[in-house]
Image (cartoon, rainbow, N blue to C red):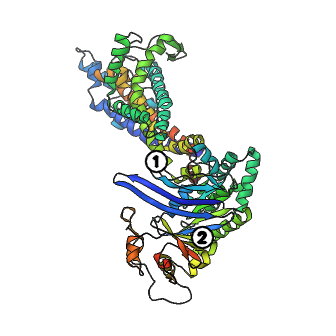
């Protein structure tokens, strides 16, 4: 395994006590694999990504569990060690390309400084490679555009530059946090295709955080569904999309409007995700779950084998049952 | 670039004209220069004579036009109080004020900016908290109190530094410099500190606030995610992004230091323009006051132009729009 996350717990100390933002999150990513992470806002998907690259916003902190990269623990590394992993072993792509690039430096300079921070390159070599990367991510006239400033690029072009920045030190894993959310729909597909192609060429694994099931279905090999700081279902993308085992995932899939027929009303899941300080005992989804029964309200289910996926749902603890 | 400078200079013209009008109005509304210049027993004919000589019988716009024409040539007439050309008086006093102002400004930037960066990066350390508390004192302490305290401690009790004056000066052409003699430098220390403290605390707090703001941005987070060193993030990416507002305020401060050195110069009997101005106010010496007013507005105009040019250097987004 390239990346293993075991029982990750992230806490936020606040004035009114400690909030647990992530609780018992476990998953792994194989080399070259694309893992999609979906969930509503506040489910903890971005935070999982931030915890992996060691950039949780203070006062958030990792309170338990471990993160291993090729077997080596990286969640408790000193800052200087972690710096060598960021960019070089784990790259990152953020949501909004308009704010991710430093407005005062040319894109070339930002590429060069990133490569030189991790690779022994002379200025001329780094510049040559920077041009190469801009060409790879599909920036026309890269040799001229390298000296342009971020504001001289469109949003989609800037996200291409961000992708180049994330990949230029050739990391084994890229954490892409909502990489297409801020972009036009027409550009989203291009960016996803680009990311997928480059990842395949470089054998880079991707953790693709998004709330867009369409993006996941197109791109990911496996998908993890998060709810209220937990992974509630994880499995191969085809199975999760077609045969969701957790009632929440099933509701999520049912709420995607079908293209082939007209529907009167879109399906929706009643209620909303609980706030972090008001997560019910037992299964966090139980107040909204159509299949809820007594056990769900008192005991918290862990991930258990359910069909072709793993789901955290008591329905699957009974022999022969399915959602 | 050249077009930009020229357009800015043209925009400055109306500002200077308005200030000139106000300066000119001083002559009409503050006191009667003729009465001030004539002796007690002058005859009515003498009075008429002088009025004609000074051109006061002309309509006001003619007088104003003459005033502007003379001002452009650096000609502001005679000081009522000292009966010497105002331009000569100011040229004599300007070096003292400018040296004091630039020393204070240098102190402000060389200490204030690093302190701001430090307290911005280590926002929760006790050193930062202490510095910020002390800086509150700096912001709230009136300049003249601080000046007198410094005189009391370093001049009266310890006797290390002079309490007034400029020390020995060296004449470099028309410029008299106190920077080249030991006594001149010693005399400069206390007034420069007095003048700098307020500005320094202000710039520290400004840089800190801007740093905190910038360090929260996505591009700084992304720079961290790219594995750049802290030094390059803090001093390259973050600091450069705080510069535009800091340059704005620092420019205004430099203008302020030059214009409002009046209090400091008075406390330390510093022979600069501010001190000259205060003395002139006391004597209703209007030509000097008018010239000072115009000169200070010119200083602000020049500084603002410099600030605009610096923006241009720092921020590529501004370059694109022009």
The chain identifier of the residue carrying mark 2 reads A
Cα separation, mark 2 vs mark 1, equals 30 Å
On screen, residue A313 above or below A101: below
- Left or right, residue A45 beside residue A192: left
Can the viewer see residue B266? no
Residue at far front of view: A319
Tell which of A220 and B109 is nearer to you.
A220
Q: Position of residue B272 (x, y in %)?
A: 41, 20
Q: Residue at 33% x, 19% y: name it.
A: B149
Tell which of A109 and B24 is nearer to you.
A109
Q: Quadrant of the N terminus of chain B?
A: top right
Q: Position of residue A61 (x, y in %)?
A: 48, 52
As helix, strand or loop, the secondary structure at mark 2 comes to helix
Can the viewer see residue A294? yes
Q: Residue at 67% x, 46% y: name it.
A: A117
Q: Position of residue B186 (x, y in %)?
A: 46, 14
Circle 2 residue: A188
Tell which of B56 and B144 is nearer to you.
B144
Please rate how many residues cluster around mark 2, counting C-alpha atoms within 10 Å: few if below 14, some from 14 to 19, many from 20: some
Where is residue B20, by image quadrant?
top left
The chain identifier of the residue carrying mark 1 reads B
On screen, residue B159 above or below A81: above
Circle 1 residue: B213
Q: Residue at 27% x, 32% y: name it.
A: B29
Please rate how many residues cluster around mark 1, counting C-alpha atoms within 10 Å: few if below 14, some from 14 to 19, many from 20: some
Q: Which mark is residue B197?
A: none
As helix, strand or loop, the secondary structure at mark 1 comes to helix
Q: Are marks 2 and 1 on the same chain?
A: no
- Left or right, residue B23 beside residue A257: left
Q: Residue at 47% x, 66% y: name it.
A: A43
């Amino acid at each position: 395994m390239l990346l293993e996350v075991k029982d990750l717990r992230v806490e936020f100390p606040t004035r009114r006590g400690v909030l647990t933002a992530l609780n018992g999150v476990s998953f792994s990513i194989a080399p070259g694999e694309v893992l999609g992470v979906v969930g509503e806002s506040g489910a903890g998907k971005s935070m999982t990504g931030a915890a992996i690259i060691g950039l949780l916003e203070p006062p958030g902190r990792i309170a338990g569990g471990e993160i291993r990269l090729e077997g080596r623990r990286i969640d408790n590394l000193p800052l200087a060690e972690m710096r060598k992993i960021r960019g070089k072993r784990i790259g990152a792509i953020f949501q909004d390309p308009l704010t991710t690039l430093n407005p005062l430096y040319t894109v070339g300079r930002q590429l060069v400084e990133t490569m030189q921070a991790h690779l022994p390159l002379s200025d001329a070599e780094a510049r040559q490679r920077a041009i190469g990367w801009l060409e790879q991510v599909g920036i026309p006239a890269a040799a001229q555009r390298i000296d342009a400033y971020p504001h001289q690029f469109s949003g989609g072009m800037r996200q291409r530059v961000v992708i180049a920045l994330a990949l230029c030190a050739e990391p084994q894993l890229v954490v892409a946090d909502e990489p297409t959310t801020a972009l036009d729909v027409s550009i989203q597909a291009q960016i996803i295709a680009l990311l997928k192609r480059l990842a395949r060429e470089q054998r880079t694994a991707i953790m693709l955080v998004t709330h867009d099931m369409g993006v996941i279905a197109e791109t990911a090999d496996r998908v993890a569904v998060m709810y209220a700081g937990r992974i509630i279902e994880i499995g191969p993308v085809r199975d999760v999309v077609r045969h969701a085992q957790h009632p929440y995932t099933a509701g999520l899939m049912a709420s995607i409007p079908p293209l082939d027929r007209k529907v009167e009303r879109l399906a929706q899941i009643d209620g909303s995700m609980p706030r972090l300080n008001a997560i019910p005992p037992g299964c966090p989804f139980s107040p909204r779950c159509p299949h809820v029964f007594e056990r769900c309200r008192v005991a918290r289910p862990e991930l258990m084998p359910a069909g072709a996926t793993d789901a955290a749902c008591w329905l699957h603890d009974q022999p022969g049952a399915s959602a | 670039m050249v077009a930009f400078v020229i357009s800015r200079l043209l925009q400055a013209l109306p500002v200077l004209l308005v200030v000139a009008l106000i300066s000119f109005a001083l002559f009409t509304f503050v006191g009667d220069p003729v009465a001030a210049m004539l002796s007690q027993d002058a005859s009515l004919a003498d009075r008429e004579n002088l009025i004609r000589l000074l051109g006061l019988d002309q309509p006001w716009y003619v007088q104003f036009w003459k005033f502007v024409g003379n001002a452009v040539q650096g000609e502001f007439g005679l000081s009522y109080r000292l009966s010497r050309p105002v331009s000569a008086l100011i040229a004599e006093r300007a070096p003292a004020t400018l040296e004091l102002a630039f020393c204070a400004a240098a102190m402000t930037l060389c200490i204030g900016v690093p302190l701001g960066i430090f307290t911005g990066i280590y926002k929760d350390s006790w050193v930062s908290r202490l510095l910020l508390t002390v800086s509150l004192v700096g912001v709230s302490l009136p300049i003249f109190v601080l000046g007198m305290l410094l005189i009391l401690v370093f001049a009266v009790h310890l006797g290390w530094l002079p309490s007034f004056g400029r020390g020995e000066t060296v004449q470099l052409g028309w410029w008299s410099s106190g920077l080249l003699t030991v006594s001149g430098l010693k005399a400069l220390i206390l007034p420069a500190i007095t003048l700098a403290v307020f500005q320094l605390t202000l710039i520290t707090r400004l840089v800190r606030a801007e740093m905190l703001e910038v360090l929260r941005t996505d591009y700084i987070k992304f720079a961290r995610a790219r594995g750049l060193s802290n030094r390059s993030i803090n001093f390259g990416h973050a600091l450069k992004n705080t510069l535009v507002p800091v340059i704005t305020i620092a420019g205004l401060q430099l203008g302020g230091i030059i214009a409002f050195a009046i209090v400091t110069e008075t406390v330390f009997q510093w022979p600069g323009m501010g001190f000259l101005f205060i003395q002139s106010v006391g004597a209703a010496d209007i030509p000097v006051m008018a010239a000072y007013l115009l000169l200070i507005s010119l200083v602000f105009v020049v500084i603002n132009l410099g600030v605009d040019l610096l923006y241009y250097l720092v921020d590529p987004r501004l370059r694109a729009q022009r």
